[in-house]
Amino acid sequence: MNNQSAPYIRTEARVSGMMMDMLLASLVLGIFSFVTYGPRPLYIMLLSCITAVLCELVCCVIGRRPLRMVLDGTAAITGLTIGLLMSPMVDAWVPMVGAAFAIVVVKAPFGGTGRNVFNPAAAGVALLTYCFPSQMFTYPAIESGVQLPLTMTIEPGTVVTEVSLAAQLQNHAIPPVDRMNILLGNFTGPIGATAFLILLTLACYLMVRRTISPWVVIPYFATCALLAWVFPLSSMNPANSFLLQLGSGYILFAGVFLINDPVTAPRFWLGRLCYGILSAGMVMLMQRHGNYEAGTCFAILLMNAFAPIIDRWSWHGWYALTRRLRTRKEVPAYE
Amino acid sequence: MRGIEDVTPASVRLPVATDDTVFPLAQLPPDAPIRCGEELCRMDDMPVLSSVCGKVEGTLMIHHPLYGPLQCADILRDGTDEVPLPIVTEEELTPDAIIELAREAAVYDELDGIPLWEKLSHWQVTEEDLTPLHSVLVADGTANDVYGSAPWAVLKEDARMVLDGLRLAAKAIRFTRYHIATMLPKRRRRALKKAVGRAYVYTVGDEYPVTVYADKSMETYRIGVQACLALAQAVREGKRHTHTVVTVAGDALPAPHNLRVPFGTNIAALLTACQAQSEHHIVLGDAMVGIPCTDPHTPLLPGMTTVLAMSPRRVRTPGPCIGCGRCAEACHVGLLPYEIVRRSENMHYERLQHLYPSDCDGCGVCSYVCPAGRDVAQEVLEAGQTKGTMFLNWGEDEYE
């Protein structure tokens, strides 16, 4: 006798269900990486995920928040996202530092789930990019086919390394373009960010499941594609430039995981549209002219700061326009 | 959807006074037999009619979840005598005469429980008035609910009579345009159109909540189909409005039905008629905006068309808003429920007004879609009453 308030029927959708979808998406990317590099990417993701969940648990205890809030899965997603953006041969403590920073500094002090201003995962990765760029951006060569050892750190010299696609583009080198390899994700880069077609498929899946909003994703991808096509890299045909630019760095990954974090993105459809377009512009700008080979996270953080303003202003504009049209033409019995 | 079944309860309970106004139980000696349709007393210029033939057992005070404290007369049913109204000829049916008949027959509008004559006399226009040119009188047959289907059942039973009542109501307020708004399935819609004529049926979108009952350029004046039926029966057959059709449904009932019952019937009697056995709790009104009811001996009064028996279910503890934006997507007014809730939680009352929380009509869709299980609609409604200060909402709960 306890559901004593309207409505007496509720939708079956749950926050935890949305988080399960994201979990599934990150697992698909983990398995993709497993095929290429062996079990080490999964190990890194797991460590990062466990760190994030433990930190969230501690923060909930300290903040006197109910412990069941840990179970909704948001912390696990933050951890996994950070793990997915690491290099497969990164020292295992690096993502743990990132995950701890994300939860303890960026999420918990603002009030935990639903109240953080900045995307914790983006902030964690931004911190790691700033502090440990050499750790972050040293990638194992993909052709070597070696299985990476499951150790905390990897001795330098034991693994053949390769310069990533994003770094080549940043140094104005012209990498050899094999379109098929790029589409299949068969090039050097972070654990989860190179799977070109898989990421696009995941985006479609999550949109169908209504876990991520097409109002953000589609404008974001469209603007990224347009910018890459219209402003090609020097001496490269637009199609190749399009593939290379979208494939490098975290651009596709951010479109599926980072900018769709509902907490830090606008919630009104028009705001989401503007947010998608603006963050795409910002991400492409940082990618082309930033100091790091992957500046996406900085761009996302910057856009997070503007998200509430974009949301409210877009709604005020829209409501002012349509309020007159919406007023109902029904006449009540008493006025 | 099922047809209508008649249920005659052993006793009925009818309001004869509210807590602040006492209406004398006029000319009623104790133990006096009273016939169906006979006047118990006059409340607000309108007769309260006995809905059954029987004997007044006494009066008692009840607390009605919808109407607050009421003094009620208990009538034990005995016999089937009915007091008819005089039949009026077509020439005598002037607009004012129709309204007067609606008052004497005690016709209530089941949409909101307001007496029909009050609505009609409020809307009535003079002969020179041009309002009818862009206005339409609508009989609401939409059953805008998950469970409710009483208007559908009424239309299925006697659509022509409903249309006749609607025509009379339109004549009473001097409107020339009127139609029945429905959201029936295709086959039923075709049958309805065949029965009353294509021009008098308007199909609304299959959505919740229904907000458009006529072409967008028209101003809509809305009454219920049962009120139309009651008006037609009062004018043509001299029957007073003593019975109503109510949907008794819910996931705890094995046999949901539309029942025709006298006003004042116990809800417990309705549930027994539908074989309610398992543990349940009662909701007055539809599943989206209904009001919980703890006392099964609450009488059924005008304005109630749905009674639900819902099985108890575990309620999730609401989680924090994660900002999925589904409430904003679902809101048919176009508000930002999540932002209203956030501001009112953070006590930014003075900034609430820019979000127009008072535009909310409380349809409850935002609570329905919320994946975090929050009571969004309730919070938005509360925010709509704060009027820029945190103090206005305190200490004026009228039912306490």
Image (cartoon, coloured by chain):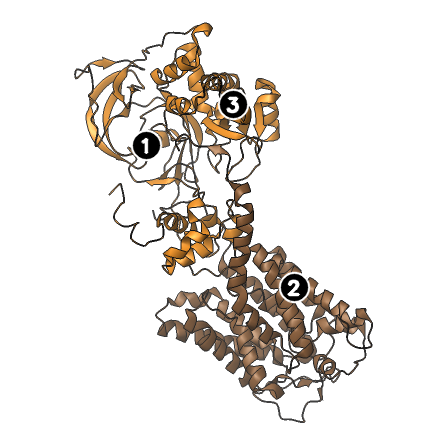
Subunit of label 2? A
Q: Is residue B262 above or below residue B85?
A: below
For label 2, the SS is helix
**x then y, percent, for residue A328:** 50, 37
* Residue A169 falls left or right of residue A316: right
Q: Is residue B147 above or below residue A291?
A: above
Q: Which residue is mark 1?
A: B268
Q: Which chain is orange?
A: B
Q: Amino acid at mark 2?
A: Tyr
* Of pointers 3 and 1, the one earlier in the residue sequence: 3
Residue A257: quadrant of the picture: bottom right
To the question of a shared chain for discs 2 and 3, the answer is no
Q: Which residue is mark 2?
A: A220
Q: Is residue A76 above or below residue B179?
A: below
Do the residues under discs 1 and 2 have CB atoms within 8 angstroms? no
Drawn colour of chain A? brown
Q: Is residue B324 visible?
A: no
Q: CA distance from mark 2 to mark 3?
A: 53 Å
What crowding class fits label 1: few (fewer than 14 Cα within 10 Å), some (14-19), or many (20 or more)?
Answer: some
Q: Nearer the viewer, mark 3 or mark 1?
A: 3
* Residue B191 falls left or right of residue B295: right
Q: Nearer the viewer, mark 1 or mark 2?
A: 2
For label 1, the SS is helix
Q: Amino acid at mark 1?
A: Ala
Subunit of label 1? B
Q: Which residue is mark 3?
A: B130
